[in-house]
Image: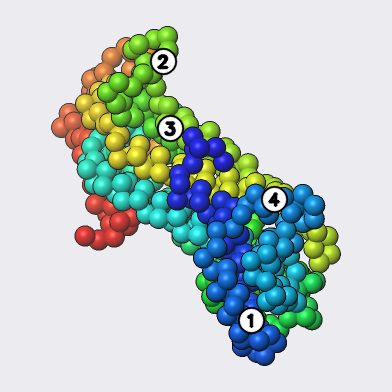
Amino acid sequence: MIPRYSRPEMTVIWEPQTRFRIWFEIEAYACDALAEIGVIPRESAKAIWDKADFVTFDVARIDEIERVTKHDVIAFLTHLAEFIGAESRFVHQGMTSSDVLDTCLAVQLSRAADLLIADIDALLFALKTRAYEHKYTPTIGRSHGIHAEPTTFGLKLAQAYAEFTRARERLVEARREISTCAISGAVGTFANIDPRVEEYVAHKMGLTPEPISTQVIPRDRHAAFFATLAVVASSVERLAIEIRHLQRTEVLEAEEYFSAGQKGSSAMPHKRNPVLTENLTGLARLVRAMAIPAMENVALWHERDISHSSVERMIGPDATVTLDFALARLTGVIENLVVYPENMRKNLEKLGGLIHSQRVLLALTQKGVSREDAYAMVQRNAMPVWRGEGDFRNLLGQDKDVSAKLSPAELDELFDLSYHFKHVDAIFARVFGKA
């Protein structure tokens, strides 16, 4: 995490003070459960809350203890005992470190997922708003980067809306899957702690009990979570790249908002660069890169090892903080995107009508011409236009084979741009629901 690409709401989830607070709550709720089933005195469980509930944990002191113990949970428990006193003997009863660490990580990832879902909701709102604004704004669709057939800019944004709707669904499922609690003790057998403690802590922390933990929560859950973040990041990049291409000087159909006083280049005062979407491409690469270590964490030795620990201490904060920032930045890009319908129209007309070639091809087949012959007839008139040697409609009208099958009025009708937009309403209804 670096401040440049961090937002405070997400960053705070991963701060030491937050982590230690979650650790305390796990331990204290476990004591409540132990008291409920008669393992420890009720007054001791209450005293633990009374003495530590509003404490600001001394991070420097915990670090100092850890330099001796070489164990972070023991350092925390030692610090906790310094102000809890005699009742601290009941803390961590029958538990192992992974019970605290894994349950805490589940809480942090579920909270992070909540923020990411809210980020996507904001992005979806922006995409829907702009999609309806440009529902019928004609633009050229491209395949292989080459002009293909007409579409609308609204449809481009509707596609992104549909994609991020799926992203939201995946995040909701990833949150559900990651939100499990393990309070099962050494090697996960509950030998020294009752399963009812786990159920109680899970309920209090907003989690569900892990069906079977081998001292650690199985890491396939975490792999699926970070893989989901990687897919969402890829969707961020897909939309970012579309905007970057549309902002190219030769295209200039849309561009990032350029604010007063903004500078595009230290050397060239005229530059207006797509810096935000280029930044999003880079951030997406980082989030995707964190999915592979998460997958490699799945294969641990026997009931547990800690090869996953160092990985998760880094990718947990970094992946969620980075994606949170990226989603918020992308929302701002969409909200402020400058769209140039007149340039879209110019680009539509750049190829002299070639974008209607399929309509002519199909019309000829409807007149009894074989598809192979029809293709040849259309292509031989298209290629000169491609080289800048005429207008497609005029060349077709001068072609004896074409004019023998299609009248001038029929040819004119085949060049009607609105033909391509007759199902826009139906597509929007599929994406956004019926109005």
Residue 395 drawn at (x, y percent)? 27, 19
The residue that mark 3 highlights is 277
Q: Determine the residue located farthest toward the bottom in the rendered image.
A: 38
Q: Are marks 1 and 4 in contact (CB under 8 Å)?
A: no
Kind of residue indicated by mark 3: Thr
Instruction: Please give left or right for residue 1 compared with residue 80 in the image.
Output: left
Q: Say which residue label 4 marks.
A: 63
Three-letter amino acid code at the position of disc 2: Ser
* Nearest-to-viewer mark from 3 and 1: 1
Work out whether mark 1 precedes mark 4 in sequence or the reverse, and give the earlier one. 1
User: Distance of mark 2 from mark 4, alpha carbons?
Assistant: 45 Å
* Rendered location of residue 179, percent (x, y): 57, 67
Q: Using residue 69 as the reference point, say whether residue 420 is left or right of it.
A: left
Task: State which quadrant residue 244 falls in.
Answer: top left
Instruction: Say what amino acid the circle numbered 1 marks.
Output: Ser
Judging by the rendered image, the residue that carries numbered circle 2 is: 265
